[in-house]
Amino acid sequence: MSDSEPILTLRPRAAAASNGVIANGHENFPQTTIRFDRQELREILAIYGRKVAAGEWRDYAIDMSRDKAVFSVFRKTSEWPLVRIEKVPKLARKQGAYSVVAATGAILKRGHDLKRVLDVLDKARLRVVR
């Protein structure tokens, strides 16, 4: 497996084949679905793991559509997402494909490099230790 190969979800093959959609040899996603690749998920889950260990985050959800892929982070499962990490390829040439959006809808950071965009989450809760 390569780093650019998408992670496949587990769906019954009959359901995927009935849609008649085959993308890159995989039957699970239509060609127009935007998704995070392995390297992007590795970077996102690394910061997610640190925040879970610190007790700040507890749950996540991944949404994929034709326009964007979204990784939402929750403090509790029943709440609104605290932070959304979005990938919108249409904005790649203009403002950058990646953005971090707060619960209020404010864009905390946007850019072309996912690592730099995710840096805003590490710096968000710096505390003085005595």
Image (spheres, rainbow, N blue to C red):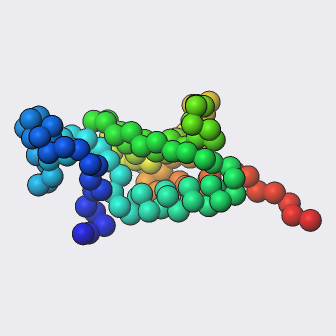
Question: Can the viewer see residue 107 in this picture?
Answer: no
67 above or below 122? above
Q: Return the residue nearer the eye: 104 or 107.
A: 104
Q: How many marks?
A: 0
- In the image, what residue occupies the spot 19% across and 43% down? 12
Q: Is residue 119 left or right of residue 88?
A: right
Question: Can the viewer see residue 58 in this picture?
Answer: yes
| Image quadrant occupied by the N terminus | bottom left
| Image quadrant occupied by the C terminus | bottom right
- In the image, what residue occupies the spot 32% across and 47% down? 35
42 above or below 121? below
Spot occupied by residue 63 in the image (x, y as percentages of width and height): 39, 39
Spot occupied by residue 61 in the image (x, y as percentages of width and height): 46, 42
| Quarter holding residue 126 | bottom right
| Quarter holding residue 90 | top left
116 above or below 15? below
Spot occupied by residue 51 in the image (x, y as percentages of width and height): 63, 55
Q: Residue furthest right?
A: 130
- In the image, what residue occupies the spot 44% across and 62% down? 42
Q: Return the residue nearer the eye: 78 or 73.
A: 78
Q: Return the residue nearer the eye: 109 or 56.
A: 56
Q: Is residue 22 left or right of residue 64?
A: left
Q: Residue furthest bottom?
A: 1
- In the image, what residue occupies the spot 47% across and 61% down? 43
Spot occupied by residue 7 in the image (x, y as percentages of width and height): 30, 56
